[in-house]
Amino acid sequence: MSLLQNNFIKVTLGLLIGVIIIFFLDPPKTACTEQIELYTEGVKGLAKSASQALAVCKEHPEPGGCVAFFDTLNKLETKFNEVTRQCQKDLSSEPLTRNWISTGMELFTLLAWGARPPESYLYRNGWLEISQVVEFCRLRNHLENIYGKEAWAGFVNNILPDLPGASQLSAIGQNEAWNRSLLSDSCHYPL
């Protein structure tokens, strides 16, 4: 009790309690925390235009109908690349990231496939240009780097059976739908 009567002890104890309260209410930020906050704000700002562009692209799944979506996807990836490589793994808990990556990959896969299966593996890119195939590969790379190879396998297992006419190709061969889809691209492009 006599220690609490000493003003120096009271001030020190008060400062210590204040620092602890400040630390818990506003923890110190790391370089990754700041980058992710900026990224999240940027992605949220693009969410509405991405949603609108996606709707237009799904309504008009041809080169001209998807230009706005490709442009928005490019902006999202630019925001993503502003986060340093060592901090990108921390984006795994940010739901918008997985959403735009998966949505972009799904759309590229569906656009390349078309309304029916491609005639052969030679046509697996459909009407997509090489720059759009490279963008698909970048998204795949992001998915694997952040969420692991299992996320890629899960994506493939979810989308491949849903491609129009893919189930009929199983009569030709077990991997025929895979071979004719954009998913089978080796992605050996400079990313």
Image (spheres, grey):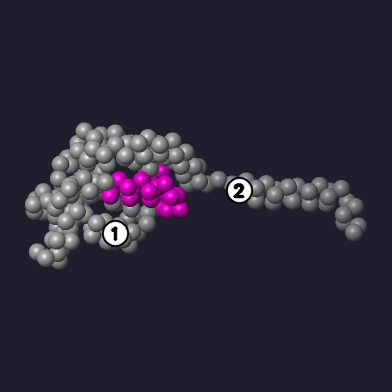
What amino acid type is highlighted by mark number 1?
A: Asn
Is residue 178 positioned above or below 37 on the image? below
Label number found at residue 158: 1
Question: 149 or 11: nearer the eye?
Answer: 149
Quadrant showing the N terminus: bottom right
Q: Hey, which quadrant is residue 2 in on the image?
A: bottom right
Instruction: Tell me the CA gap for discs 1 and 2.
Output: 39 Å
Q: Is residue 90 visible?
A: no
Is residue 182 positioned above or below 75 on the image? below
Q: Hey, which quadrant is residue 128 in on the image?
A: top left
Which residue does the numbered mark 2 point to in the structure image? Answer: 27
What amino acid type is highlighted by mark number 2?
A: Pro
Quadrant showing the C terminus: top left
Q: Which residues are magenta?
A: 83-106
**Residue 141 % position (x, y):** 29, 51
Q: Secondary structure at mark 1?
A: helix
- Mark 1 vs mark 2: which is more N-terminal? 2
Q: Which residue is painted at 40% across and 39% down in the image?
A: 47
Mark 2: few/some/many CA within 10 Å (<14, 14-19, 20+): few
* Residue 84 forms part of the magenta stretch: yes
